[in-house]
Amino acid sequence: ERIERFSPGGEQRASLPPLPAPLFSSHAAVADSKVWIVGVDGDRARRFFEIDVGAGQATWITHAPWPGLGDEITSATEQTNALLITLRTDGGSERIVQWKADEGWKDRGSAPAPLVAGSASALGQAHVLYVSSTTPSSVLGFHTITGSWTTLAAAPGGAESRAATQWQNGLVWLRV
């Protein structure tokens, strides 16, 4: 297992130290020079690591894992120095938990609909966009300060979304 960082042109390509433990079902988020990685290890234990790639001797820091509110990590994103991850529960609902260095983990409640895995995209100072996996799909906005949700756009034609990713200052997704 090898983790690399890359800058266009390849001038700053560098290998990072190996993770403290191999992870499965992992997701990463970036905040300035910090990289946060969440996942589960071979024993299904939740794991949360951080590294500052701007530090002279970059080493992984192990943080306390998120509370057991869901079994499957579906996304991770950074918004204003906070890590937000979505977790799918056994019942299929989505929970959001937020981590800040000075506050630790905080349960931010349930999403109003199941979300497309990997669809988190930070926007502005306090919003994160998600794509719902319902039929029809819609773009949902989560306000990180108030914890409120809003539907920003509905997909025309009753299509369901299966894949999404952050693109520039928004999202791009596949409808089927």
Image: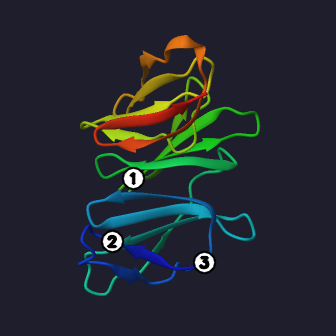
Image coordinates for residue 107, horizontal then vertical, percent? 52, 41
Q: Nearer the viewer, mark 1 or mark 3?
A: 3
> As rendered, which of 133 and 143 lies closer to the eye?
133
Q: Based on the displayed image, in which of its 4 quarters is residue 123 positioned? A: top left
> As rendered, which of 166 and 42 lies closer to the eye?
166
User: Is residue 19 in view from this perspective?
Assistant: yes
Q: Based on the displayed image, in which of its 4 quarters is residue 167 positioned? A: top left
Q: Residue at x 73, y 64 (%)?
A: 44
What label does residue 36 carry, if any? Answer: none
Above or below for 144 versus 136? below
Query: Which quadrant is home to the C terminus?
Result: top right
Q: Is residue 125 left or right of residue 151?
A: left
Label 2: few (<14), some or many (≥20) within 10 Å? few
Q: Is residue 114 left or right of residue 98?
A: right
Query: Which quadrant is home to the N terminus?
Result: bottom right
In the rendered structure, which disc, 1 or 3, sits on the residue that comes first in sequence? 3
Task: Check the image and name the residue furthest to the bottom.
Answer: 57
Label 1: few (<14), some or many (≥20) within 10 Å? few
What label does residue 21 carry, if any? Answer: 3
Q: Secondary structure at mark 3?
A: loop
Q: Secondary structure at mark 1?
A: loop
Q: Residue at x 29, y 42 (%)?
A: 168
| Marks 1/3: CA–CA distance | 25 Å
Q: Secondary structure at mark 2?
A: loop
Residue designated by label 2: 6
> As rendered, which of 149 and 171 lies closer to the eye?
171
Above or below for 160 versus 36? above
What label does residue 103 carry, if any? Answer: 1
| Amino acid type for the residue under numbered disc 2 | Phe
User: Do tag 2 and tag 1 residues touch (Cβ < 8 Å)?
Assistant: no
| Amino acid type for the residue under numbered disc 3 | Ala
